[in-house]
């Protein structure tokens, strides 16, 4: 979460209890001996390899370890049972480029100058790859999506592979694991950082039949395509009762879940290489996602359209048996916290770095209490052709401010013309702040599904949450990085890349 100074912050009794509990968890079991002092000076995972598995569009609540009843993730559930599970992990954007840039830099989208369709890590900010490379790690970046093909995403990564365009959109997880396994073979005797971006379960949800049948008794014969068959006709389908209980909707969710299962199996295949090379005992594995996915919780599908919880709640699992004790953490964590947490665990200095996130585990692997005066959780979605929106969460309260808003029924038309607008240069320049045209306020403890907007019922709370977001604006104005020219990420697409992006629903 961002370390935005906020002297007006007050603590509720529940917050005090949580803080005290986290503080107790972070205390060492014994203190005062020379052995303990020496141990504390050496970070827990010094010399460990790091593998970050980022799974596109993966909702936390569709994994067994987060309470899902379907058997979509047996291998990830195993890692979760042996690792640290952050139950309330959130992404800082529902758009891949913004959220991955945040993960790689420890800076939020506006603060880090990484906004909109061309979002990418700033060259002025040390990135995960550059920091690990400078610390003597071999670094690899392997991706199944052209969304991360720009060179600013791969700063500091020595080996970079984006899988060939001729491979299909779905079902490439095993290919990615095979490429990553080759990297492991080459660098088995060296320290390494490996970033892997699995595309599935991103739409259009086209899983292997065997995985579908592992979750359903038979295959639905007439599936709706999430983009060409659903996006444009969704309003009419909703009037017909399309939604949970409708066989077409249930098929859609089953296909999504089957792709999670396929990715789970691909990750297990990668893990088998780790075991064969005897690397699993000195490797930290991080399982997370760039964002979630909507399934009509707010009358729309897909992602990168809103910042509701179904788009933000992601898994975050850290696995290092014998080092990180298995536990479940209820404290809020987010993508922006991952970089400082990894640096803390492996012992790479982050002194002097301008970061918006904070370590959520200390050098001994204990839960770290939030720093005094820590600001709110912030997420942003700043796609000018779609929706421009920010959210702030403090305690049980969530505030959403929209600078551009499209009702669900208006989104299909916007998706149809957004590429034309980009070609005309509509996206640049982008004004990161502007008048708020829509506000929403939710109490997540009482209304976790965000169905009861309280914006008119709690004026004092509304003013408080506005101030929380205003503090982030002031922070960005004083400490933020400017948005770079995104030309290196907005280069002309090849016909094959255009076809892939259109299949992804972005064009």
Image (tube, helix red, strand yellow):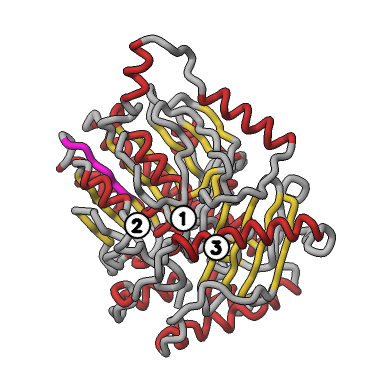
Residue 290's mark? Answer: 1
Q: Which is closer to the viewer, label 3 or label 2?
A: 3
Q: Is residue 420 magenta?
A: no
Q: Which is closer to the viewer, label 2 or label 1?
A: 1
User: Residue 444 placed where, x, y %?
Assistant: 71, 49
Residue at the far bottom in the pictured view: 424
Highlighted magenta segment, given as a residue range: 190-195
**Left or right: 246 with respect to 195?**
right
User: Residue 396 placed where, x, y %?
Assistant: 70, 46
Quarter containing the C terminus: bottom left
Q: Earlier in the sequence, mark 1 or mark 3?
A: 1
Secondary structure at badge 1 equals loop
- Mark 2 lies on residue: 172
Q: Which residue is drawn at the image coordinates 35% and 42% (left, top)?
A: 351
- Mark 3 lies on residue: 474
Q: Earlier in the sequence, mark 2 or mark 1?
A: 2
> In the rendered structure, are the residues bearing label 3 and label 2 in contact, judged by CB atoms less than 8 Å apart?
no
Distance from Cα at disc 2 to Cα at disc 1: 17 Å
Mark 1: few, some, or many residues within 10 Å (few <14, many ≥20)?
Answer: many
Q: Main secondary structure of the magenta part?
A: strand
Tell me if I can see residue 444 in this picture.
Answer: yes
């Amino acid at each position: 979460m961002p370390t935005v100074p906020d002297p007006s912050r007050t603590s509720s009794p529940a917050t005090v209890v949580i803080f005290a509990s986290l503080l107790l968890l972070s205390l060492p079991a014994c203190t005062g001996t020379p052995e303990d002092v020496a141990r504390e000076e050496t970070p827990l995972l010094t010399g460990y390899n790091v593998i970050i598995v980022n799974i596109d569009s993966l909702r936390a609540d569709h994994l067994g370890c987060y309470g899902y009843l379907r058997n979509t993730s047996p291998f990830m559930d195993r890692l979760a049972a042996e690792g640290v599970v952050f139950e309330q992990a959130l992404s800082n954007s529902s758009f891949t480029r913004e959220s991955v840039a945040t993960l790689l830099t420890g800076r939020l989208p506006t603060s880090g100058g990484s906004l909109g369709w061309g979002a990418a890590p700033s060259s002025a900010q040390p990135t995960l790859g550059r920091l690990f490379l400078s610390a003597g790690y071999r670094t690899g970046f392997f991706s199944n999506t052209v969304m991360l093909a720009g060179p600013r995403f791969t700063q500091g990564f020595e080996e970079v592979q984006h899988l060939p365009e001729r491979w299909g959109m779905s079902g490439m997880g095993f290919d990615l694991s095979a490429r990553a396994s080759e990297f492991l073979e080459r660098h088995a005797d060296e320290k390494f950082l490996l970033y892997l971006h699995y595309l599935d379960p991103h739409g259009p949800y086209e899983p292997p039949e065997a995985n579908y049948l592992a979750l359903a008794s038979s295959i639905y014969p007439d599936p709706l395509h999430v983009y060409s068959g659903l996006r444009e006709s969704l309003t009419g389908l909703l009037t017909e009762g399309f939604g949970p209980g409708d066989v077409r909707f249930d098929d859609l969710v089953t296909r999504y879940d089957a792709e999670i299962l396929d990715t789970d199996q691909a990750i297990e295949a990668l893990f088998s290489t780790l075991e064969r090379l005897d690397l699993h005992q000195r490797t930290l594995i991080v399982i997370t996602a760039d964002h979630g996915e909507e399934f009509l919780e707010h009358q729309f599908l897909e992602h990168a359209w809103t910042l509701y919880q179904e788009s933000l709640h992601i898994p975050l699992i850290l696995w290092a048996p014998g080092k990180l004790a298995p536990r479940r953490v209820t404290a809020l964590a987010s993508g922006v916290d991952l970089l400082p947490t990894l640096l803390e665990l492996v012992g790479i200095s982050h002194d002097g770095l301008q970061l918006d996130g904070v370590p959520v585990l200390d050098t001994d692997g204990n839960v770290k209490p939030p720093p005094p005066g820590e600001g709110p959780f912030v997420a942003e979605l700043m796609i000018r052709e779609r929706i421009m929106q920010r959210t702030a969460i403090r305690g049980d309260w969530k505030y959403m401010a929209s600078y551009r808003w499209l009702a669900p029924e208006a989104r299909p038309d916007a998706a149809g013309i957004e590429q034309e607008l980009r070609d005309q240069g509509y996206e640049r320049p982008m004004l990161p702040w502007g008048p708020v045209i829509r506000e929403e306020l939710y109490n997540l403890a009482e209304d976790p599904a965000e169905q009861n907007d309280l914006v008119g019922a709690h004026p004092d709370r509304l003013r408080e949450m506005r101030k929380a977001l205003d503090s982030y604006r002031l922070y960005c104005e004083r400490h933020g990085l400017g948005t770079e020219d995104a030309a290196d990420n907005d280069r002309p697409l090849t016909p094959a890349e255009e076809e892939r992006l259109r299949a992804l629903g972005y064009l």
